[in-house]
Image (cartoon, rainbow, N blue to C red):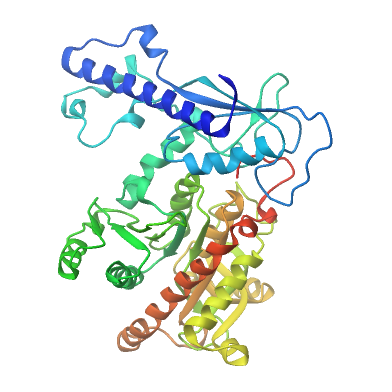
Amino acid sequence: MAGLTPEQAVDRLEALHASACDGLRSALTRFATSGVPPTAQERAAFRYPELCVDWQPQGPVPYTRRAWAKFQEPGRYATTVTQPGFFRRYLLDQLRPLVEEFGARLEVGISGQEIPYPFVTEAGDEFLDAELSVSELARYFPTPVLANVGDEIADGAWRFEEGKPRPLALFDAMRIDFSLRRLVHYTGTDWRTIQPWILFTNYQRYLDQFLAWAVEELVRPDGVYTRLALPGGAVVRRGDSVDAMAATIAGAPWHRFQMPAYNLMRGDDKGGISIVNIGVGPSNAKTATDHLAVLRPHCWLMIGHCGGLRQSQTIGDYVLAHGYLRRDRILDDLMPTEIPVPALAEVQLALQEAAARVTGERGDALKRRLRTGTVVSYDDRNWELRWSQERRRIGLGRCIAIDMESAALATQGYRLRVPYGTLLCVSDKPLHGEIKLPGAATRFYQRAVGEHLKIGIEAIDLLRGELGSLHSRKLRGFDEPPFR
């Protein structure tokens, strides 16, 4: 179907995707109950819809300062689409400027990419209880083929072929579906509840403070937040009693999940906040962001602890990262270390202003507590045992703080075109003999975590009003897909 409006195109995508998924689910149910496999004709319908955008300019090319929803070259662009109902607003935001400003023509049809059967199953499906052999299912139903799941577009590894369309988006349908399932596995929450503003932390205490704040927001009479989705699937809602909320939160089995997430949703269209405890290490940071990126979030921020490397720092001070010395090695093959990972001005300014508002300090008083500089991230928690080898490199980098996750999170943001930022709190000074002894650590956590979390939340509130500039041209290359 060609010559569609953006609204008609998304409606058509929804109808085609629903029809394909319903047909696949019906065939699975029939096979589980009677052993009858799908016919070749039936299987041919188990395919993702495809969205094509054709731009053949006839006059002057429109100029826009926007970093996305624009064309680099005339031609035909295409991508397969999954879950178009969930992504409806995102799709419309991308398509409307392409049609209204550039005069692009939209087409929707059925692609040649099959929908793997695991991507249409949900908890409670009858056929999941049947004793089905995975190898038997693979004989008759589409399965995820890893050769077809990759980040070639995001990593700039795709090659233009004459007669074939250019990529319309960074991720195709199969890559997105793969990550949506991984998100449920790692975070313990339905991917549909994950919000576009994401806080990462490496300490459970931040989650405890977030939950206390979330409950306050849910009971506040004029509050904008409406629901809180918990690991394991439970939800607390505005209108529940505080005792009921506390009981539901306490009963959430967060410990069963590697990276538990808590998703606080708003009643308007401005997007709520998710907080994810990625734990310790750059591998977890990469894993989480590989999958969260397919949701096209507006921003992710790291709010965790670090070691202060300067004598002038005090435990409880803040570090606003403006650069990263990448010694974590986790992304070296995908993003070579000679590639700079720039700080994003919009995020930096929001974090600094948020710190000023929350602490009540500005000017020199704020500078005494918040220092801007380079953060070095390691993949080895016991980096101290290699201090003699690392000392010169840390000095050359003028590093002011050390952690394990920040560089990976920032590099992934840069690589996957998601705005990013880092505000860390100094919890010890390993080079100066100030370590976290039990008593001092407890006092530090009680004092610092709540304030630090509030700064992250305040920064998100500031960034909500800057979406036009937040999705920065710094994140876009010279040969980008039109979609953000």
Residue at 63%, 66% in the rendered image: 346
Q: Residue sitting at 54 percent across and 89 percent down?
A: 361
Q: Where 244 falls versus 12 (above or below)?
A: below
* Res 223 → quadrant: bottom left
Q: Quick check: can you spot residue 249?
A: yes
Residue found at the very far right of the displayed protein: 60
Position of residue 292 in the picture relative to residue 361 (left or right): left
Give 465 or 471, whichever is nearer the viewer. 465
Q: Is residue 12 above or below residue 213?
A: above
Q: Is residue 242 above or below residue 55?
A: below
Residue 235: give x, y in percent of width and height. Answer: 24, 55
Q: Position of residue 324 (x, y in %)?
A: 61, 66
How many numbered marks appear?
0
Quarter of image, res 241: bottom left
State the residue in front, 309 or 190.
190
User: What is the x, y in percent for residue 217?
Assistant: 33, 69
